[in-house]
Image (cartoon, grey):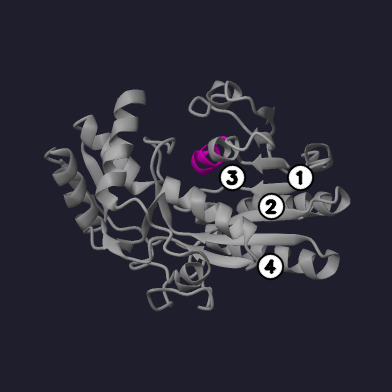
Amino acid sequence: MKISILGAAGFIGTNLAIKLAEDKSNVITLVDTVDSFFEPHRKMGLGFNYRIVNFNEKTDFDRLLNGQHVVYHFFSSSNPTKSNLNIPFELRDNVLTTSLFLEACVRQNVHKVVFLSSGGTVYGCEAICPISEDSSTRPITSYGVQKIAIENLLYLYNYTYKLDYRIIRLANPYGPYQRPNGQLGAITTFIYKALKHEPIHVYGDGTVIRDFIYIDDVVSGILNIVNGDIKLVNLGSGKGISIKQILGLIGQTLGIELNIVFDKARTVDVPVNYLDITRYIDLFGNPVTVPLDEGIKMTAAFLDKNYV
């Protein structure tokens, strides 16, 4: 099968590509930009085709998608915490670009598009936890608005052109290959700071509740959803845990005393968010095979070897 991952240089794309490569019948093309963190050699040595592309309205998607069977849409220029600073730019670079991508998918007879949406941002503040796929979507960031807009584009292209798709509303993933010094990925960032004995900055008082899932379980879940028949599925642990509790677990698991600094809370952070994963469980069973303490240990081992 010919598979393309657009946005493959990132955390989830990297782990998915490594897993897909285990099936030697797959011909995998990785497409993304490259910066000082996402070096091409990380994946070129694994036998993938690699194309360096900036995703925008000038991208030649027809060339990228020619002959592809399944295409993963993981690309985004948006940062959830900063997406409200320039909303028109965010919408142009992500929603408009995706519409051009989908036009090319139709022209190139792509069999299936897999879109990584956001279970953490599309539902907003009003949904009752655990949040099901049928809950209303009232995002409070441009990032969440973009995700919903792209979901609706997929519905439209399926209705108009019969373009098949799957949407994964993902909780908060963590684990190896996640950028340890960025503004996303609380657990990975906290572990990295702990290993370096640096201050850990927390927005607010640490009572924000999130749903965390280890990357291996994310990849397995994505592949189950892609090969299943349901088009929209939440993927997470189904359990909420506060940032304070996560920090306590990291300190306890690693045997490190953490230096925690509490900063001003952010308006873009939903106070409580964890997903109802009943639909996933009914189809595929429990997605969680790696408990938090084990995931923390494995993430710490990876960071210690590669970045500390």
Mark 2 lies on a secondary structure that is helix
Earlier sequence position, callout 1 versus callout 3? 1
For residue 152, the mark is 4
User: Where 44 sits versus 4, above or below?
Assistant: above
For residue 77, the mark is 3
Q: Residue 287 location, x and y as percent? A: 43, 59
Badge 4 local density, few (<14 within 10 Å), some, or many (20+)?
Answer: few
Earlier sequence position, callout 2 versus callout 3? 3
Badge 2 local density, few (<14 within 10 Å), some, or many (20+)?
Answer: some
Q: State the CA–CA distance, disc 1 to disc 3.
A: 13 Å
The quarter holding residue 67 reads top right
Q: Amino acid at mark 4?
A: Asn
> Which image quarter is the N terminus in?
top right
**Residue linked to disc 2:** 92
Earlier sequence position, callout 4 versus callout 3? 3
Q: Could you tell me if residue 82 is visible in this image?
A: no
Q: Are marks 4 and 1 in contact (CB under 8 Å)?
A: no
User: Where 187 sits versus 283, above or below?
Assistant: above
The quarter holding residue 176 reads top left
In the image, 226 versus 184, the foreground residue is: 226
The nearer-to-camera label among 4 and 1 is: 4
In the image, 198 versus 222, the foreground residue is: 222
Q: Amino acid at mark 2?
A: Arg
Earlier sequence position, callout 1 versus callout 2? 1
The residue stretch that appears in magenta: 9-16
Q: Are marks 4 and 3 in contact (CB under 8 Å)?
A: no
Q: State the CA–CA distance, disc 2 to disc 4.
A: 16 Å
The nearer-to-camera label among 2 and 4 is: 4
Q: Are marks 1 and 2 in contact (CB under 8 Å)?
A: yes
